[in-house]
Image (spheres, rainbow, N blue to C red):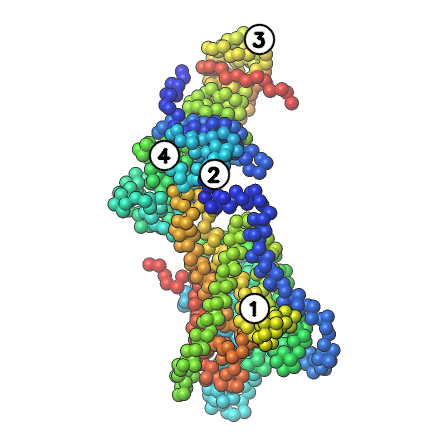
Amino acid sequence: MLSLSPIQKFVYRLNNSRRTARVLLSLPVWLMAIIVLIPIGVIVLSWLHPQTEVWQHLIETQLGFLLKNTIILFVGVGVWTLVFGVSLAWFVAMCEFPGRRWLEWALILPLAMPAYVFAFVMLGLMDYSGPVQTLYREWFGAKAYFPYMRGTFGILFVMTSVLYPYVYMLARSAFIHQGRSALDNARLLGLSPWASFFRVALPMARPAIAAGLSLALMETLADFGAVSIFNFDTFTTAIYKSWFGLFNITAAAQLASLLLLFVALALFTEQHFRRGKVHQNPLQHQRYQLSKTKAWATTLYCSTVVLLAFVIPVMQLIVWIVDAENLVWDQRFSELIKNTLVIGFSAAMIIVCVGLLVVFGRRLLGYRQNSGLLRIASMGYAFPGTVLAVGVMIPFAYIDRELGQPITRWLGVENDHVLLGSMTGLLLAYLIRFFSVALGPLSTSLERIKPVYQHISQTLGANQWSLVKRVYVPLMSSGILTALLLVLVDVMKEMPATLLLRPFGSETLAIRIYELTSEGEWEQAALPALVLVSLSILPVIIMIRRSGIRLRDKQ
Amino acid sequence: MKNEPLVAVTDYLQITDVNVCFDEATIVHSASLTLGDGQIGCILGPSGCGKSTLLRAVAGLENLCAGNITLGGRELSASDYTISPDKREIGMVFQDFALFPHLTVAENIAFGLTSWSKTERQQRVDRLLALVGLVGMESRYPDSLSGGQQQRIALARAMAPKPKLLLLDEPFSGLDASLREELVPEIREILLEEQVSALLVTHDQMEAFAMADKVAVMNEGTIHQCDTAYNVYHEPESRFVAGFVGQGEFMRAIVVDELSVDSSLGRLHSKEPHGFVENQSVEILVRPDDVLHDDDSEVTGEILSKQFRGSHFLYRVILPSKQQLYCFASSHHNHALGEAIGIKLDLDHLVMFAERPSV
């Protein structure tokens, strides 16, 4: 018969039995979209069983409070990340000042600091007995005013410090790409520097800033660790409490649906402000020369941010570790690290495999196919971990009750929970939340492999296997490794979903930090926290490199 | 004066009545083309005419739905038979060169040489680097090379396994004009030096003329004419070829007898019978170089537009009969718009088509 290569045969079959092939190739993205939609559906449907008593109680006692706190957090973090993110980005992108080169990447570093780590470090530093207040009292006397760090100001400070880099990174690259010509024109047309900033530079960078802001807002809404350390009750902590305190998972789901409304608001913000073109100006980038005073003031401003948001907390962690006497890298801690890595790697492998299936399916089908489904599939990053946990828990409990228990009873093995409390739920939640994290590097690296490479290899006498070995693997390996690393670190940092869905007795670094900090044992939490921060530096370095900042100058 | 007829080399590449179809659409219509061993052929046509598809069919990247392709007597493709691209020993240079970004220049060139011994491979890579003039670049990566350098590496990579035929898909379209002018003759030299038969695809006639021993003019999936560049220019066999290759105007004329016609520039004579019947309305192809500016000529034309081209002027003139023509005039003959200048025809032979039915 015909002598065709496997890919030709496949394409041949694709042409002939189009529908089957299309269904087969679309399957991964369909499944992924359904997996993402199930938790949302479950949460919305929870309103079919209104929990009147619980809600009565909630409305009387907490609901107003929860709404107030969530709105304060949402608006406060939104405004402050905008102010710091945009101003820092502007200075770094458009002005020349001493130390700009290293500040350009150092300003991204706070991204490596999980909010809950920064939160407990802050409390340790700033509490009445902490070093800052002690020193303050020595200088200004015992009665001098000191801001109440456990309150609104403290939590806003913490969240802003770790989240401004999202706005900073995207705004910086927008400012650099849009260049100076539009601004110079605005000045020639008679606008003052400030007016040209607000009327030209800012509107041009708006899509990028909106994207960064919505990321920061989504992280804010998802945060569970930092707010629980500050006892700043929001929906995430309320969901946790109604589950573990009241054992009412339906009420938890209904709270989760309210939280989802806020998430929708964040997404809407992005969609609304993101409209419009991303401006590209490939001309050489010329920075403004500042006067000496202004330049040094800028250096001072930028380095203070790095100092407060990254250097000082890391130093404090190190001090605690060095000071602690009974703290050693013991057997239990090695176990903890091992467990964290096992969970992280399993999740990363699963997510990257699913991601590969999806991107290859799209490649073979054509990129215009299924793009709506892909958008749904990668929507999971917007779900707070607590919401996801509830959304996974409810169907699992249902399946266990209706299917698992009868089967185990029939088999003669009494087991109340088959799915519940198993690794499956946790891995599923990770898959939903971090799928889009893996998708980025995977599709970028696949796009590097032009379809024409296949033809070139063939005309050079290479068969399919050697094509895979000599072209696909070397060209995709860095993308796959990046995806694995990004997911691994995100999974290790993830706290609320892990806390709610983990198999009984299974501990990770994040869980240990939660347990220790909820008992106020900050010194003890320093070691797992520092390990987590150090690991989180790796994806941040990847991000720094991707944003085109050179860590070392080429000679 | 005619170019010598093609020497009857046994046809090395034979493309016979080939159809290529996508879904219901037929992209290439019974295309036929032959190429002798060691010759350089060119498929010339406007974009979207199916020329690249035909080239890909020769490479085995598209299947045929009719016709067949043979190379050196071996059948490569037929409507029910396709040898896969990796077993054809045909090299191909793609439009965007598409060098492998993860491999060095030397590794790119050696990509198709896996079955060669290490010393042979090294020698081959060295020879090709010398041939394309890039010695010393072997350990560079493609993204550090200029467009012209990438082009030459792509060529070296395709030639490395000593293919029986080399295909080039719009090899110069990604390069800027000055570089193209420099590279075209250079690439031709390299191909001749390697004694490789080659078939290239282009929409640029100057490229085709400079590169090819044989030009196949293609439009809407059909090959209109396959001949030497000289013949394609001077003896176009179809109205499309006449219009697409070179500049020119069609001038109306009436057939007088089997050797002559009457036009607004007087009676014109053909050396051979033209095959049209008496009193038939025909159109004659008049190239700008067929129309000479002659102050003594009785026939004058009014200048409608002019372009200064350095060595000469290109005038567009309108005759009293409303016939418009292009005319080359020496650079010294600078006339103003609207001025009437004397012109005369210097037709060496007549290229004639039946008059188009008026619209």
Q: On the image, numbered disc 3 is attached to which residue?
A: B278
| Sequence-earlier tag: 1 or 2 | 2
As drawn, is A148 to the left or to the right of B204? right
Q: Where is residue A39 in the image (x, y as percent from the top left)?
A: 63, 67
Q: Position of residue A520 (x, y in %)?
A: 51, 86
Q: Where is residue A148 in the image (x, y as percent from the top left)?
A: 56, 84
The amino acid pointed to by label 1 is Ala
Residue visible at 32% across and 47% down in the picture: B106
Q: Nearer the viewer, residue A142 or B312?
A: A142
Q: Which of marks 2 and 3 is in front?
A: 2
As drawn, is A485 to the left or to the right of A389? left
Q: Is residue A207 above or below residue A327?
A: above
Q: In this view, does B161 lie above or below B301?
A: below
- What number is the disc on residue B164? 4
Q: On the image, numbered disc 1 is attached to which residue?
A: A429
Q: On the image, numbered disc 2 is attached to which residue?
A: A2
The amino acid pointed to by label 2 is Leu
